[in-house]
Amino acid sequence: MIEHMKRDWLSNIRGDVLAGIVVALALIPEAIAFSIIAGVDPKVGLYSSFCIAVIIAFVGGRPGMISAATGAMALLMVTLVKDHGLEYLLAATLLTGVLQICAGYLKLGSLMRFVSRSVVTGFVNALAILIFMAQLPELTDVTWHVYAMTAAGLGIIYLFPYIPAIGKMLPSPLLCIVALTIVAISLDLNIRTVGDMGELPDTLPIFLWPDVPLNMETLLIILPYSAGLAVVGLLESMMTATIVDELTDTSSDGNKECKGQGIANIGAGLFGGMAGCAMIGQSIINVKSGGRGRLSTFMAGLVLIIMVVFLDDWVSQIPMAALVAVMIMVSIGTFSWSSITDLRTNPLSSSIVMVSTVVVVVATHNLAFGVLIGVLLATLFFSNKIGRLMMVKSDFNELENMRTYEVIGQVFFASAEQFTKAFDFKEALETVVIDLTHAHFWDITAVSSLDKVVIKFRREGATVNIVGMNEATATVVDKFGVHNDPQEVEKLLDGH
């Protein structure tokens, strides 16, 4: 336990503290923007980001990952806030946390193993595109000063690390924000600042139980929204954890992360915040700025609330161009550029899955839809591929007028029709042997196809023997097969 705490909290103090400061600065305008999207006061998003980041630092399953208020979650809240108000949003946030904790205990975090590499790549690329697109309003219909500041910020971010000695001492995104703020204030540039995004809160969050009736009507109102928030939140968190795992070459606990996200959302709901989840953009900023442990996540939340409450006069003067430069860096770093060249070498099915995931996410701005489509396509392609690997060989014994059919491969819903067509039912035979030594039957569709084959041969007057079933196949055939049940056979024949 002590070794775990030292590794997660104290093994990288300087890097975690500096990275946390960078992330906090990047969180402020996004939290305000997401609040505006959801239709609530900016302080709701800021309080949410503070609570979630601080709590998840202690209970999350992925050290170094940043969780806060997010755009994907905010989009799902719009109708609830519009129709029922903030109090119902707080109640929905609490229920979202409860559902996510239940998901953790049900070990749903382990379902990430069903998400293919192509889907993850598509998810990452789509998110990179969305992050870049989100910066475009700050670069549209503005003066040349904004473009100059953004270009200068990108120059600092990418060139500062190459300066000998001091290049590795400070995170370049932090230096970018500080330097451009000083320049903007010194030259009194008339450009958009963080303060223009919305009013910053002047008090710490307080405990706030949602003022809603505790009855079935309230539950029916918030449950659909909470279920959607829980699914999208866990999906984005699990995908982000996978990316951070790869960036840091470490592993994380998906089920613990589900519980942690739930606890953090309950905490946010009790202190006037909205539901949130892991943020891939801020998580990448954290990792690239040197953050690795739980201390970086904790510092991000702590510095955020300190800056917006106690240093709001200074924070409000940070030019948006500086933060745009940081987010463009995140977008460039997030996008898997190798995936473009891999389109020529990867299997066509993998490329289709990746591109489809990107297109759906960018078109709908909903990560859940894109990942769902990607997983569905990957499953269909995989099933089709495995189904084609099934084959049936036959050998005829002329002396005994017996034909042996040897089934090789996996028989399931995708290969069941091919299995049935492999037999010649019109051949006059005394005995038919179906050898399943090298086959595996997976589902009731496969068993049903076996029933049809056996019944058709018997109807033609042949004796059918099934041999070589492994234990798993024998179990599913014994449980669902009907070819040895006369009554069921009659029903099946009547159905034809």
Image (cartoon, rainbow, N blue to C red):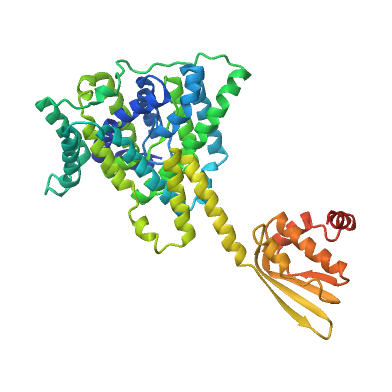
Q: Front-most of 345 and 17?
A: 345
Which percent across, then down, holds residue 438? 67, 70
In front: 128, or 250? 128
Instruction: Residue lying at the far left in this picture: please name it.
Output: 187
Q: Is residue 465 above or below residue 162?
A: below
- Badge count: 0
Drawn side of residue 350 relative to residue 137, left or right: right
Q: Position of residue 358 (x, y in %)?
A: 42, 47
Instruction: From the viewer's side, name the closer residue of 227 and 193.
Output: 193
| Quarter holding residue 315 | top left
Asked whether residue 160 appears in the rendered view, the answer is: yes
Horizontal side of residue 217 vs 402, given as left or right:
left
Residue depicted at 60% across the width and 23% down the height: 220
Given the current orientation, which residue lies at the most extreme bottom position? 399
Residue 42's image quarter? top left
- In the picture as drawn, the residue positioned furthest to the front comes out as 141
- The C terminus sits in image quarter: bottom right
**23 or 183, which is in the foreground?**
183
Left or right for 466, reference 121? right
At which x and y percent is residue 435? 73, 72
Q: Residue at x 61, y 17 (%)?
A: 215
State the quadrant of the N terminus: top left
In the rendered view, would you say 262 is above or below 112? above
Give residue 189's position: percent from left, percent from top.
14, 27
Q: Residue at x 53, y 38 (%)?
A: 104
- Say whether residue 138 is left or right of residue 183: right
190 over 443 or under it: above or below:
above
Instruction: Answer whether residue 170 is visible to the viewer in this image.
Output: no
Q: Please tell me whether residue 383 is drawn above or below residue 372 in the rendered image.
A: below
The residue sitting at 53% across, 33% down in the picture is 228
